[in-house]
Image (cartoon, rainbow, N blue to C red):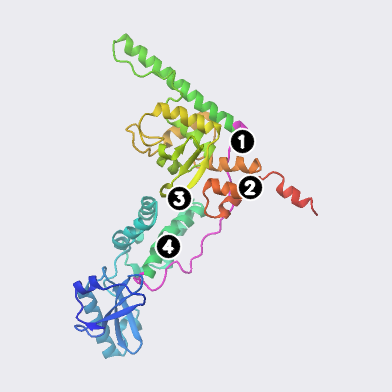
Amino acid sequence: MKTKITQKLIYSLPTERKAYRVHDTVQPGLFIRVLPSGHKSYMVTWGRNKNATLGRVGVMTLDQARTEAARYLADAHEHGEPLAITQGRKGVVLPSLRDFIDDTYMPWFETHHKGHEKTLHTLNNNFATIMPQRLDSITGRDLEQIRTGWMQSGNKPSTVNRKMGSISGVFSRAVEWEYIATHPLAKLKQLKVDSLGKVRYLNADETRRLREALDARQDEARAERETANKWRADRRKEQMQSLLQLPFTDHLKSLVLVSLNTGMRRGELFDLKWSAVNFQTKTITAIGATTKTSDTRHIPMNRETIGVLEDWQKQVGKSQYVFPNQEGDRLEDVKSAWLKLLKRANIEDFRWHDMRHDFASRLVMAGVPLNTVRDLLGHADIKMTLRYAHLAPGTKAAAVDLI
């Protein structure tokens, strides 16, 4: 199809089952290619089966595409081939890494993936040195130097791989959308890590100390409230609510106990609403929109979880969230209270996420099949669950006894 390409025409080009081209009658050699995915690119041709992509529609303007196409044809007339081909000259309109992330990549990422705030934070805080560079000027050597710096500063291999994974996704899309021809990380291998890794869970004594610390923390809060109310009474001030008859002085104890008994991720607990807690079926439903894998799963509640949530529901008020903040909205952080609790319990090297490992470890040690544990944890791949396999009672010993 040949016609005068205009912005109105570009916006109206339909997506079809097969790729097709629309050639410009204003600038010879310029055409737009429309893929079945809806992706549209400006391209130029200067001879039989000799084509090159100039840029993506929406990033490169029509005027820029015509100017660049004219340069290709002028070079081809004078030198036989465009200098962009013979000398590797790139188009002048390619965006910087910063502009590509802000204008193109993140709008797409936010639509298709969860946790875009965390990904953007990783990109912003770890790749500042290459952000001003044009996309096509960033090399594997640039990224290798950044990675080496992280390792020298003490980052673990798994952390380094995770950071590199964030920027790798950016360049993968840049290649797919034809901004650049090759991926700068194509030849940079991931660092080797222990895929099973260390599983941190609480031993019996640590479990006892953690629970005792939760109770001691509540006793201390109740005593402080009574002292404060006595002070207020002596001065004829309005009394604050007594905590003596309440099962919980704040959200921390109920949060920790539910986490230990369900293995739910912290974000899943923060997102949990009372509508997803069913006391009749004794299940908690982790809605797909709030889970890491986007899959809904149903988690049975044991007796302690039911008791905790029944008591907590009576106390927490009318918020839709099971664990709301003081304003009744979604809770965002418990880091400070959690770290103080661990210090009180004298427990070291134990993250909030490790309560999920503790849940899984106790199940496996009790003889629960790994596939059942996978379902309860919401792992998309059994490989993630296999890190607990060594905890299964007598499995390896029984196997060795067979020979």
Location of residue 277 in the rendering, given as x and y in whole percent from the top left corner: 45, 37
> Where does the magenta region start and end?
177-205
> Which residue type carries mark 3?
Lys
Q: CA distance from mark 2 to mark 4?
A: 36 Å
Q: CA distance from mark 1 to mark 4?
A: 39 Å
Measuring from the top left, give residue 243's x and y in whole percent: 41, 20
Q: Which numbered marker is on residue 369?
A: 2
Foreground disc of the pair 4, 3? 3
State whether residue 248 is above or below residue 198.
above
Q: CA distance from mark 4 to mark 3?
A: 20 Å
x and y percentages locating residue 226 in the rendered image: 40, 15
Cα–Cα span, label 2 and label 1: 21 Å
**Number of the front mark, 2 or 4:** 2
- Quadrant of the rendering where the N terminus is positioned: bottom left
Q: Quadrant of residue 206?
A: top right
- 170 lies left or right of 385: left
Q: Residues within 10 Å of mark 4 (few under 14, many from 20)?
A: some
Which residue, given by chain and number where applicable, does mark 4 sit on?
168
Indicate the amino acid at tag 1: Asn
Question: Residue 70: which disc?
Answer: none
Q: Which quarter of the rendered picture does the C terminus lie within?
A: bottom right
Label 2 is placed on what type of residue? Pro
The residue under label 1 is 203
Q: Quadrant of residue 87?
A: bottom left
Number of numbered discs: 4
Q: Nearer the viewer, residue 280 or 140?
A: 280
**Residue at the spot x=55%, y=48% of the render?**
375
User: CB atoms at circles 2 and 4 under 8 Å apart?
Assistant: no
Whether 379 is drawn above or below 90: the answer is above
Residue 292's disc is 3
Instruction: Determine the main secondary structure of the stretch shown in magenta.
Output: loop
